[in-house]
Amino acid sequence: MGQLINPDSAGKQRTQLTKAIVLAVRELARQTEPGPESRDLAAFIALALQTIADGIDVSGVAWEKRGYWFNATRSPWIWC
């Protein structure tokens, strides 16, 4: 059986959330006065940023599990 690939990876989710945050900030900038929609947009931005921060730890663990950090330090292209 071949390798299973998760189509909803943490990196893909970060990209989608980043684009959604940009759209929310643009819409929030169009608001002339605070209201319920402005609070909803601000809450969405805060929750999306928290989700991105949590996903970074997941990606870091996956990279460390594969030994990418160790392999990068042994690269012949690093001049130390």
Image (cartoon, helix red, strand yellow):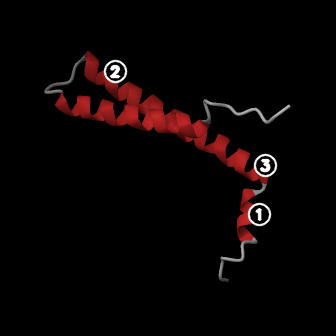
Q: Is residue 73 left or right of residue 33?
A: right
- Contact? badges 3 and 2 (CB < 8 Å): no
Locate residue 79: give its quadrant.
Answer: bottom right
| Disc 1 to disc 3, C-alpha distance | 10 Å
Number of residue marks: 3
Residue drawn at x 32%, y 30% as measured from the top left: 24
Q: Is residue 45 left or right of residue 12?
A: left
| Disc 2 to disc 1, C-alpha distance | 43 Å
Task: Return the residue at label 3.
Answer: 65
Q: Callout 1 environment at 10 Å: few (<14), some (14 to 19), or many (20+)?
A: few
Q: Position of residue 80 (x, y in %)?
A: 67, 83
Q: Amino acid at mark 2?
A: Asp
Q: Callout 3 environment at 10 Å: few (<14), some (14 to 19), or many (20+)?
A: few
Residue drawn at x 60%, y 37% as measured from the top left: 10
Q: Position of residue 36 (x, y in %)?
A: 27, 16
Q: Amino acid at mark 1?
A: Phe
Task: Tell me which numbered mark, 1 or 3, is placed earlier along the sequence.
Answer: 3
Task: Return the residue at label 2.
Answer: 40
Task: Tell me which numbered mark, 3 or 2, is placed earlier along the sequence.
Answer: 2
Circle 2 sits in a helix, a strand or a loop, which is it? helix
Identity of the residue furthest to the right in this view: 1
Q: Position of residue 13 (x, y in %)?
A: 53, 33
**Quarter of the image with the N terminus in it:** top right
Residue drawn at x 72%, y 70% as measured from the top left: 73
Task: Return the residue at label 1.
Answer: 70
Residue 15 lies, with reference to residue 32, above or below; the image says below
Circle 3 sits in a helix, a strand or a loop, which is it? helix
Q: Callout 2 environment at 10 Å: few (<14), some (14 to 19), or many (20+)?
A: few
